[in-house]
Image (cartoon, rainbow, N blue to C red):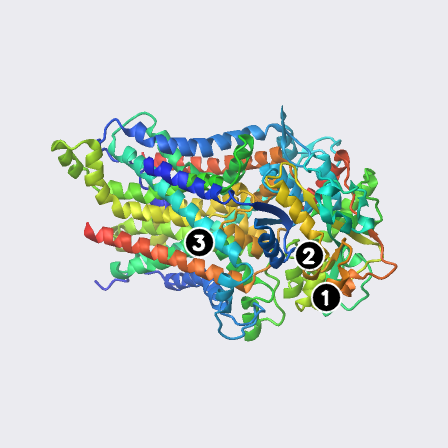
Amino acid sequence: MAKTDLRRFAGFRVTTWLCLLVLYAPLVIVAVYSFNASTSITRWGGFSLKWYVDVFTGPEAPRFRDAAINSFVIAIAAATCATIIATAAAVAMNRTGRFRGKMASLALINLPLMVPEIVTAVASLIFFITIGFKTGLMTIFVAHLVFCIPFAYLPIAARMQSVPDMYEQAAMDLYATPWEAFRLVLLPLMIPGILSGFLLAFIISLDDFLITNFVKGAGIETLPTAIFGSVKQGIKPNIMAISTLLLGVSVVLVTLSWVIGRAGQSRN
Amino acid sequence: MAGAAPGGGASRSEVYRGSGPRLLLPAWIFIGVFLLLPVILMAVYSFLTKEFRGGVIWEFTFAAYDQFFLNRGLFGDEPPTIEWTYLGIFWRSIWQAGLATFFCLLIGFPTAWYVATRPVSTRSVWLFLITIPYWVNLLIRTVSMKFLLRDTGPLNEFLMWTGVIAEPLSLINTNFAVQVGLFYSYLPFMVLPIYAAVERYDFALSEAAADLYCDSWTTLRLVILPAVKPGIVAGCILVFVPSLGAFLAPDLLGGAKTFMIGSLIEEQFKGAAGNWPFGAAAAMILLTVVMGVLLIHARAQMREDG
Amino acid sequence: MKTLLTTSALALTLATAAAAEGELKIYHWFEYIPQELLDKFAEEYDVTVTMDTFDSNEALLATLKAGKLGEYDVAVPGDYMVKIMADEGMLDTFTPDEMPNFDNIEDQWVDVEFDPGRKSTIPYQWGSTSFSVNTEAYDGPLDSLSLIFEPPEELKGKINVLDTSGETLTLASLYAGIPQCTSDREQLKALNALVQGAKPAWASFGSDVAKDVLVSGDAAAGMIWSGFSAKARAEGAPIEYVFPKEGMIVWMDNVALLKDAPNRDNALKFMNFLLEPENAAAVTNYAQYTAGVEGVAEFLEPEVANSPESNPPADAKGVFVQACPEEVQVLYDAIWTNLKK
């Protein structure tokens, strides 16, 4: 049939390229300027790695190093715990039939996604002050764990829905206990979903500024709060270098998550 | 992402029958104790008496809501009229968030459509390209935008170099900059759910419309848009809700000059105002607005699902 | 669940591991102490030093109120904030014999009104708050606060003001000729009208950006502290710090021993350390204000000692910001909120 392509609309391709331009231009510009040799951040003074050297050895290096360690420790701890909790929750929602409070539980798991961040931040601060909980690494960890749960839950639950339960049924027909059926049959099938859930939670934790800024303790910074503190006084070249490094970390993790996801899909 | 939210229609499997509540216990404990309880406590705080320069006195009062809604003059002794200050801040935030949502939709829909109609082999690469900025640190993206827009920044330098403008444009510290920041922050949130909806769209419908002599734009308006509406609505919510409570964009791009809801609340706890009950009340009102939007969405969806 | 507990325990141990050795937690103004000086103290006394920063006296108070009192050892409030914090019971006291270098404090700064006899604080640095103007953008006379509050065309939309009610409203009061902490309705209304009228000409509110906006050219005039202006000039901003005829703010920042300080001994060591002339001079050389310690002169860099910002003309007028009583302060708070809405 000599029909026009029904999928094509004039201008949509241009808009898509525009969209990509808008999304990437600022990031690319910052990445480019992070290699600027000049101290004045807007004038180009030739290619140099000196701001990267500055990040690791400059006067602010210890501060950013400690912040990076805090960020990664919290992100790993929060994402690990959130993944375990989310996996348990996904099994409950997808493999245990009907029970009382199921819909309420689903709403609860998604609650951190629905409450605006500033509200969560303020509520957490008030809560910790009222119960006299000393703010510190622990308060950041707990707050991160809470909002990481739904992010870990989404891919895990999606994966679990696509895995039919017949293998587990078969295992249990052969006298496997429920725990064995879960551990030996469902869990291996779930690995791609669990990994991408973990990675999402990890990135979300690494990303958070607002809530962390409210519940962090004295002298404790994460990378975003440390960067915010510096940026408030003006964008300096070393901040661009750190941003570019963090950008790299995000890209690597997303790529990893994407590759794992594809591997999981193609095996099906 | 919520547009394709899995877990909603839970599967019927009953392999581990009976252990549901036990498996959900950790989620209930953590989210219940460290989010639900704090939000309830915050609601209580909004009815407490403020202590001078931060803190609360445990005496119940409606003073915080009174301050929000009623204007009693600078000295507090004039007959009350409606207080437009804070309603104005809320209105400005809603307006800014609404505009950001509109522009995200304007760019996001064609993008989602274009990506979803690529051949399967290249589609995931396109999707991947759209997803990456979504996962890049929001703070870093806002900072990048701040750098781009400043008077002596690359954008102005570029425009002056090309001769389009002779003097640098004052872009930073304006409502426009905040707008651009919100748009830029949440654009991927719009693309992904619409993409998910378009991917599921049955092109037989377009063919049928074409057979009935619809031109392509009429098909878009009458057939496609209604079919992918759930994705569009989900995208709009995912942009609107975080834009409404945004803090970074107004603070870094708006020059902290005009309050949005997020900065108004923050100021009560971290800034000079130090009025905790008022901050809690403003947060409660924000939460109510957001929950209202989500509830309307949920009900509409339930009605559509039958 | 077991993994969960182990991980949490791990995170907790990491959190407490750092607290085991000698520690000092400082809550300080941003960009106000050279890192080398902190390192020097850490090395000399074998103490791990951590520092958070704030950008206004009000933010300092708000943070300490929001559960941080008892986490920091020392903070650096300005004069009027020392009085407020003392009234709120947020300061600990010490005796001069706990601090061998106590006698190094310049006589004029010992019996100060906000801390008579220096029972909770020691002087850190003093300076002034006024504003600076980019002389390439504006070539008129630089002598009046009108450049900020009723600016000429060249400066409109190019002004940054400090994001703190204490200093901004005090400068506005000086310009309007209104006494501080007034409860007179007409005067407060005039003050409110003045800042409301000026706001459209202001580009941004920011304290931490005050230097950067002048260096980058994003602002052509900006309220700023004397030393911060000197640093902006050193970084290439073509600006001049103005001593307005209506008067300016004079202030003294002080290192205060906080109540419930977890490391009181280290806090006192640190305060004593800062009273060494060499160390006080190191702060001055970095921040470009003036130390309240005797014997610093020989350690000062000449361009810092002779900077125009730190050496006002003989007829310059300065006032300290006053801490207002609650019933008056709420009115000033209302004007400020009204301004920022």
The amino acid beneath tag 1 is Glu
Query: Which residue is painted at 49% across and 56% down in the image?
Result: B140
Under mark 3, the amino acid is Leu
Q: Are marks 3 and 2 on the same chain?
A: no
Q: Position of residue B149 (x, y in %)?
A: 56, 62
Local packing at callout 2 (Cα closer than 10 Å; few below 14, some 14-19, many 20+) is some
Mark 2 and mark 1 in contact? Answer it, CB < 8 Å: no
Residue C236, percent from left and from top: 67, 69
Toward the viewer: C86 or C18?
Answer: C18
Position in image of residue C324 (x %, y %): 77, 39
Task: Give residue B187's mark.
Answer: 3
In the depicted structure, whether residue B218 falls above or below residue A77: below
What is the three-letter code of the residue carrying label 2?
Answer: Asn
Q: CA distance from mark 3 to mark 1?
A: 52 Å
- Count the marks: 3
Can residue B232 be seen at all in this image of the molecule?
Answer: no
Mark in the foreground, 3 or 2: 2
Mark 2, secondary structure of its residue: helix
Residue under label 2, please give it.
Answer: C279
